[in-house]
Image (spheres, rainbow, N blue to C red):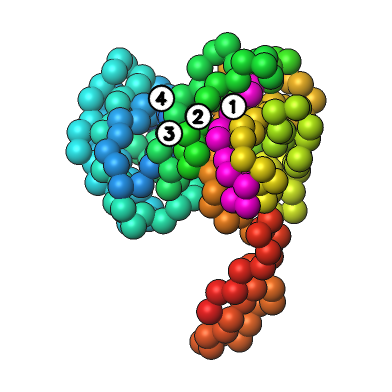
Amino acid sequence: MRLSLSALLSVVVFGVTSQVSLSADPALSVILPRGVQRGTEQVLRFAGARLNDADGIFFYEPGFEVLEIKPADANNIDVKIRIAPDCALGEHTAQVRTKTGISDYRTFFVGALPAVDEKEPNTDFAAPQQVPMNSTVIGTVENEDVDYFVVEARKGDRLSVEVEGMRFGQTLFDPYIAILNDKRFELSAEDDSPLLKQDAATSIVVPEDGKYTIEMRDSGYGGNGNCRYRLHIGNFPRPTSVFPAGGKAGEAMEVMLIGDAMGPIAKP
């Protein structure tokens, strides 16, 4: 079968054009930190390739205002954003627009609690990092790493812990969390969960006034620099399922949130 010279030239030109286009397209690898607190202003690092001529950020939910975009180098940009107080909690998506194209989608999270950075060393149960109640710890699990955090709690209060790690989708990371008393007795522990898959959440009713230690690690004692996590610690409710599981479209109904340590929560 013969191909004309013009057809061959078309194929070659198309191939070269496609290659040039791909080499100029911006690429977004990760957004750091992996989450922000709503009602605040924060600088996020958008890391990737060919992002230095960025002139816009696309968000796909309301609640975000871009205040400034500054190139950090040829491949990364720092973006100052304002997050609305009523911004939806949970996972959000963003893209970078440059003068040569639009980047990949990447996700980040919005939370309700102020952030606290993990401070090493915190691998000894006897010397944990003290953190405030109702805060989000931003940390990383390295190989065979175990991170300990301690909070003060009062008898009868709820103590809830939830981790975002596997949901970041960066690497194989299976978080494990546990709540222990000052005698190192395990009051609650969670690895996987039906609601959060390989992430985990748990809550207890505090049995007595005192200090309670949160253990955070990979379930198999693995880890690396990409095993980032956001560890929420506080007295917030943490149900794990809802009943009934559905209803009729267009009709209001009362549901029961179940799985929280303090018991079911009715929501109209």
What residue did someone put label 1 on? Answer: 149
Q: Residue at x 62, y 15 (%)?
A: 127
| Gap in angstroms between the C-alphas marked 3 and 2 | 10 Å
What main secondary structure does the magenta stretch of the protein show?
strand
- Residue 151, horizontal then vertical, whole percent: 56, 33
Tell me which label, 3 or 4, sits earlier in the chain: 4
- Residue 181, horizontal then vertical, whole percent: 71, 33
Q: Residue at x 52, y 25 (%)?
A: 130
| Gap in angstroms between the C-alphas marked 1 and 3 | 14 Å
Judge the density around disc 1: few (<14), some (14-19), many (≥20) Cα neighbours within 10 Å: many
| Gap in angstroms between the C-alphas marked 4 and 1 | 29 Å
What residue did someone put label 3 on? Answer: 115
Tag in front: 3 or 2 = 2
Quadrant of the image occupied by residue 199 = top right
Tell me which label, 4 or 1, sits earlier in the chain: 4
Contact (Cβ within 8 Å) of mark 4 with mark 1: no
The range drawn in magenta is 147-161
Lateral position of residue 136 relative to residue 68, left or right: right
What residue did someone put label 4 on? Answer: 47
Quadrant of the image occupied by residue 242 = bottom right
